[in-house]
Image (spheres, rainbow, N blue to C red):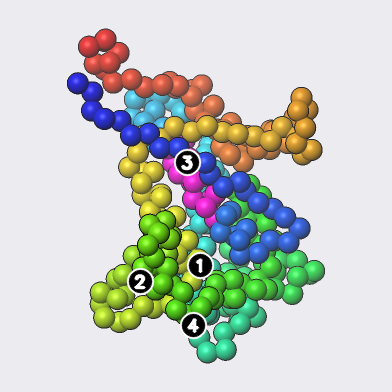
Amino acid sequence: QLAPLSIGLLDIFGFEIFELNSLEQLCINFANEKLQGLFNQVMVLHAQQESLKEGIPVAQLDFSGLDNAPCRELVEARPGGLFALLEDECQVPKGSDEGLHTKVHTAYGKVPHPAYKRGSTRLRLGFTLVHYAGEVVYDMAGFLEKNKDRGPVDAIPLLRNSSCALLRVAFAPTKAEQAAMSAKKGARFSGVVAKFGSQLAELTKHLKASSLHFIRCFKPNAALRPKQFEHDRVAAQLRCNGVLQTCLLMKAGFPDRLPFAHALGQ
Protein backbone atom coordinates (compact mmCIF):
# COMPACT_ATOMS: atom_id res chain seq x y z
CA GLN A 1 0.00 0.00 0.00
CA LEU A 2 1.36 3.37 -1.04
CA ALA A 3 1.94 6.00 1.63
CA PRO A 4 -0.22 9.16 1.45
CA LEU A 5 1.27 11.72 -0.93
CA SER A 6 1.05 15.44 -0.25
CA ILE A 7 1.42 17.75 -3.26
CA GLY A 8 1.87 21.49 -2.86
CA LEU A 9 1.87 24.15 -5.59
CA LEU A 10 3.83 27.39 -5.18
CA ASP A 11 3.10 30.24 -7.59
CA ILE A 12 6.10 32.50 -7.05
CA PHE A 13 6.24 36.28 -7.17
CA GLY A 14 6.97 37.87 -10.53
CA PHE A 15 10.26 39.81 -10.62
CA GLU A 16 9.47 43.55 -10.62
CA ILE A 17 11.44 46.40 -12.22
CA PHE A 18 9.43 49.64 -12.36
CA GLU A 19 10.21 53.28 -13.01
CA LEU A 20 10.17 53.74 -9.22
CA ASN A 21 11.06 50.76 -7.01
CA SER A 22 10.54 50.86 -3.25
CA LEU A 23 10.43 48.46 -0.29
CA GLU A 24 7.62 46.40 -1.83
CA GLN A 25 9.70 45.63 -4.91
CA LEU A 26 12.75 44.88 -2.77
CA CYS A 27 10.85 42.23 -0.79
CA ILE A 28 9.33 40.69 -3.92
CA ASN A 29 12.65 40.60 -5.77
CA PHE A 30 14.45 39.19 -2.74
CA ALA A 31 11.91 36.35 -2.60
CA ASN A 32 12.71 35.71 -6.26
CA GLU A 33 16.42 35.65 -5.40
CA LYS A 34 15.87 33.03 -2.69
CA LEU A 35 13.76 30.78 -4.91
CA GLN A 36 16.12 31.21 -7.86
CA GLY A 37 19.02 30.24 -5.61
CA LEU A 38 17.11 27.10 -4.61
CA PHE A 39 16.47 26.30 -8.29
CA ASN A 40 20.18 26.71 -9.09
CA GLN A 41 21.15 24.50 -6.16
CA VAL A 42 18.74 21.70 -7.04
CA MET A 43 18.78 21.75 -10.83
CA VAL A 44 22.39 22.72 -11.58
CA LEU A 45 24.88 22.64 -8.72
CA HIS A 46 23.59 19.48 -7.04
CA ALA A 47 23.08 17.76 -10.41
CA GLN A 48 26.63 18.67 -11.41
CA GLN A 49 27.99 17.10 -8.22
CA GLU A 50 25.98 13.92 -8.86
CA SER A 51 27.31 13.70 -12.42
CA LEU A 52 30.90 14.07 -11.24
CA LYS A 53 30.36 11.27 -8.69
CA GLU A 54 29.13 9.04 -11.53
CA GLY A 55 32.20 9.82 -13.65
CA ILE A 56 30.33 11.92 -16.22
CA PRO A 57 32.71 14.61 -17.57
CA VAL A 58 30.77 17.79 -16.84
CA ALA A 59 33.60 19.59 -15.03
CA GLN A 60 34.29 21.70 -18.12
CA LEU A 61 30.88 23.37 -17.84
CA ASP A 62 31.35 26.70 -16.04
CA PHE A 63 28.50 27.57 -13.68
CA SER A 64 30.59 29.83 -11.43
CA GLY A 65 28.53 32.95 -12.18
CA LEU A 66 25.15 31.29 -11.84
CA ASP A 67 24.63 31.40 -8.07
CA ASN A 68 23.88 35.00 -7.07
CA ALA A 69 24.73 34.47 -3.39
CA PRO A 70 26.30 37.96 -2.88
CA CYS A 71 22.95 39.65 -3.49
CA ARG A 72 21.06 37.37 -1.10
CA GLU A 73 23.72 37.77 1.59
CA LEU A 74 23.70 41.56 1.23
CA VAL A 75 19.97 41.65 1.94
CA GLU A 76 19.60 39.03 4.68
CA ALA A 77 22.99 38.97 6.44
CA ARG A 78 23.03 39.56 10.19
CA PRO A 79 23.92 41.87 11.76
CA GLY A 80 24.99 44.02 8.82
CA GLY A 81 22.58 43.14 6.00
CA LEU A 82 20.14 45.56 4.41
CA PHE A 83 17.09 44.20 6.24
CA ALA A 84 18.96 44.22 9.58
CA LEU A 85 20.13 47.80 9.07
CA LEU A 86 16.55 48.85 8.26
CA GLU A 87 15.23 47.18 11.43
CA ASP A 88 17.92 48.90 13.52
CA GLU A 89 17.24 52.32 12.01
CA CYS A 90 13.54 51.96 12.84
CA GLN A 91 14.45 51.62 16.52
CA VAL A 92 17.04 54.35 17.01
CA PRO A 93 15.85 57.80 18.20
CA LYS A 94 15.22 60.09 15.24
CA GLY A 95 15.93 57.30 12.76
CA SER A 96 15.45 58.38 9.16
CA ASP A 97 15.64 57.19 5.56
CA GLU A 98 18.69 59.42 5.16
CA GLY A 99 20.39 57.71 8.11
CA LEU A 100 19.61 54.28 6.64
CA HIS A 101 21.00 55.32 3.25
CA THR A 102 24.23 56.50 4.89
CA LYS A 103 24.62 53.25 6.85
CA VAL A 104 23.98 51.05 3.81
CA HIS A 105 26.41 52.99 1.63
CA THR A 106 29.04 52.95 4.40
CA ALA A 107 28.67 49.17 4.70
CA TYR A 108 28.58 48.29 1.01
CA GLY A 109 29.45 51.31 -1.12
CA LYS A 110 32.86 52.43 0.10
CA VAL A 111 34.44 49.02 -0.44
CA PRO A 112 33.30 47.58 -3.82
CA HIS A 113 30.62 44.92 -3.43
CA PRO A 114 29.56 42.70 -6.37
CA ALA A 115 25.84 43.18 -5.68
CA TYR A 116 25.72 46.88 -4.67
CA LYS A 117 26.00 50.14 -6.56
CA ARG A 118 25.49 53.69 -5.33
CA GLY A 119 22.34 54.39 -7.33
CA SER A 120 21.43 57.06 -9.85
CA THR A 121 21.76 60.82 -9.92
CA ARG A 122 17.99 61.26 -10.24
CA LEU A 123 17.32 59.73 -6.79
CA ARG A 124 18.74 61.39 -3.69
CA LEU A 125 18.32 58.19 -1.65
CA GLY A 126 18.79 55.75 -4.49
CA PHE A 127 20.88 52.58 -4.56
CA THR A 128 21.22 49.70 -6.99
CA LEU A 129 21.15 45.95 -6.36
CA VAL A 130 22.54 43.54 -8.93
CA HIS A 131 19.90 40.79 -9.05
CA TYR A 132 20.12 37.59 -11.08
CA ALA A 133 17.53 39.08 -13.45
CA GLY A 134 19.30 42.42 -13.81
CA GLU A 135 20.14 45.64 -12.00
CA VAL A 136 17.31 47.37 -10.09
CA VAL A 137 17.47 50.93 -8.75
CA TYR A 138 15.60 51.34 -5.44
CA ASP A 139 14.51 54.54 -3.73
CA MET A 140 14.90 54.48 0.07
CA ALA A 141 12.52 57.39 0.57
CA GLY A 142 9.72 56.02 2.74
CA PHE A 143 11.50 52.78 3.72
CA LEU A 144 11.22 53.37 7.47
CA GLU A 145 7.55 54.31 7.46
CA LYS A 146 6.67 51.32 5.28
CA ASN A 147 8.67 48.95 7.47
CA LYS A 148 7.04 50.21 10.67
CA ASP A 149 3.59 49.69 9.12
CA ARG A 150 1.97 51.59 11.95
CA GLY A 151 -1.58 50.85 13.00
CA PRO A 152 -3.73 51.38 16.08
CA VAL A 153 -1.94 49.99 19.15
CA ASP A 154 -5.01 48.10 20.37
CA ALA A 155 -5.82 46.58 16.97
CA ILE A 156 -3.26 43.75 17.00
CA PRO A 157 -4.42 42.10 20.27
CA LEU A 158 -8.00 42.49 19.08
CA LEU A 159 -7.26 40.79 15.75
CA ARG A 160 -5.23 38.02 17.40
CA ASN A 161 -8.20 37.18 19.61
CA SER A 162 -10.82 37.53 16.88
CA SER A 163 -13.57 34.95 16.47
CA CYS A 164 -12.47 34.70 12.81
CA ALA A 165 -9.82 31.98 12.43
CA LEU A 166 -8.33 33.62 9.34
CA LEU A 167 -7.61 36.86 11.22
CA ARG A 168 -6.05 34.96 14.14
CA VAL A 169 -3.67 33.19 11.75
CA ALA A 170 -2.87 36.31 9.69
CA PHE A 171 -1.94 38.40 12.74
CA ALA A 172 -0.36 35.68 14.88
CA PRO A 173 2.98 36.67 16.48
CA THR A 174 6.10 35.66 14.59
CA LYS A 175 8.59 33.18 16.04
CA ALA A 176 10.93 36.08 16.89
CA GLU A 177 8.15 37.80 18.86
CA GLN A 178 7.26 34.55 20.63
CA ALA A 179 10.90 33.96 21.57
CA ALA A 180 11.21 37.50 22.94
CA MET A 181 8.04 37.16 25.01
CA SER A 182 9.01 33.73 26.35
CA ALA A 183 12.37 35.20 27.41
CA LYS A 184 10.41 37.85 29.34
CA LYS A 185 12.08 40.64 27.41
CA GLY A 186 8.89 41.95 25.93
CA ALA A 187 8.03 41.97 22.28
CA ARG A 188 10.99 43.56 20.49
CA PHE A 189 10.20 45.70 17.47
CA SER A 190 9.59 43.55 14.42
CA GLY A 191 8.92 45.37 11.17
CA VAL A 192 7.62 44.25 7.81
CA VAL A 193 11.00 42.99 6.54
CA ALA A 194 11.64 40.94 9.69
CA LYS A 195 8.26 39.22 9.41
CA PHE A 196 8.67 38.79 5.66
CA GLY A 197 12.15 37.31 6.11
CA SER A 198 10.90 34.91 8.77
CA GLN A 199 8.05 33.69 6.57
CA LEU A 200 10.38 33.33 3.59
CA ALA A 201 12.84 31.30 5.69
CA GLU A 202 10.04 28.96 6.75
CA LEU A 203 8.94 28.55 3.13
CA THR A 204 12.51 27.84 2.00
CA LYS A 205 12.96 25.27 4.77
CA HIS A 206 9.75 23.53 3.73
CA LEU A 207 10.77 23.51 0.06
CA LYS A 208 14.21 22.06 0.83
CA ALA A 209 12.52 19.17 2.64
CA SER A 210 10.33 18.43 -0.40
CA SER A 211 10.88 16.67 -3.71
CA LEU A 212 10.97 19.65 -6.03
CA HIS A 213 9.79 20.00 -9.63
CA PHE A 214 9.87 23.28 -11.51
CA ILE A 215 7.70 24.79 -14.25
CA ARG A 216 9.28 27.84 -15.89
CA CYS A 217 7.05 30.50 -17.46
CA PHE A 218 8.34 33.19 -19.80
CA LYS A 219 6.91 36.37 -21.27
CA PRO A 220 7.06 35.96 -25.06
CA ASN A 221 6.64 39.70 -25.72
CA ALA A 222 6.46 43.03 -23.91
CA ALA A 223 2.99 43.86 -25.23
CA LEU A 224 1.41 40.73 -23.67
CA ARG A 225 -0.19 39.86 -27.00
CA PRO A 226 -0.83 36.36 -28.37
CA LYS A 227 1.18 34.83 -31.22
CA GLN A 228 4.08 37.29 -30.84
CA PHE A 229 7.50 35.85 -30.01
CA GLU A 230 10.44 38.17 -29.26
CA HIS A 231 13.56 36.02 -29.51
CA ASP A 232 15.90 38.37 -27.61
CA ARG A 233 13.47 38.79 -24.71
CA VAL A 234 12.95 35.04 -24.32
CA ALA A 235 16.68 34.27 -24.66
CA ALA A 236 17.48 36.80 -21.91
CA GLN A 237 14.95 35.14 -19.59
CA LEU A 238 16.39 31.70 -20.35
CA ARG A 239 19.91 32.90 -19.54
CA CYS A 240 19.14 34.71 -16.27
CA ASN A 241 16.90 31.89 -14.99
CA GLY A 242 19.59 29.24 -15.43
CA VAL A 243 17.55 27.20 -17.92
CA LEU A 244 20.30 27.11 -20.55
CA GLN A 245 22.81 25.85 -17.96
CA THR A 246 20.35 23.15 -16.91
CA CYS A 247 19.96 22.01 -20.53
CA LEU A 248 23.75 21.90 -20.99
CA LEU A 249 24.09 19.78 -17.86
CA MET A 250 21.38 17.36 -18.96
CA LYS A 251 22.94 17.13 -22.41
CA ALA A 252 26.31 16.22 -20.88
CA GLY A 253 24.87 13.59 -18.54
CA PHE A 254 21.50 12.00 -17.86
CA PRO A 255 18.25 14.02 -17.93
CA ASP A 256 16.58 11.67 -15.43
CA ARG A 257 17.69 9.36 -12.66
CA LEU A 258 15.67 6.36 -11.49
CA PRO A 259 16.25 4.16 -8.42
CA PHE A 260 17.91 0.87 -9.42
CA ALA A 261 14.98 -1.26 -8.26
CA HIS A 262 12.53 0.92 -10.17
CA ALA A 263 14.62 0.63 -13.34
CA LEU A 264 14.46 -3.17 -13.05
CA GLY A 265 10.69 -3.00 -12.70
CA GLN A 266 10.63 -4.37 -9.16
Contact, CB < 8 Å: mark 4 with mark 3?
Answer: no
Upstream in sequence: badge 4 or badge 3: 3
Q: Which residue is tagged 2?
A: 177
Residue under label 1, please give it.
192
Q: Report which residue position mark 4 lands on.
A: 91
- Disc 1 is placed on an element classified as helix
> For the C terminus, which image quadrant?
top left
Instruction: Please give the count of numbered marks on the rendered protein.
Output: 4
Q: Nearer the viewer, mark 1 or mark 4?
A: 1
Residue found 23% across the figure and 23% down from its top: 2
Mark closer to the chain start, 1 or 2: 2
Query: Dot 2: what SS?
Result: helix
Q: Amino acid at mark 2?
A: Glu
| Mark 2 or mark 3, earlier in chain | 3
Circles 1 and 3, Cβ within 8 Å, touching? The answer is no
Q: Which residues fall within the magenta stretch?
A: 30-44
Q: Which residue is mark 3?
A: 10
User: Toward the viewer: 25 or 67?
Assistant: 25
- As helix, strand or loop, the secondary structure at mark 3 comes to loop
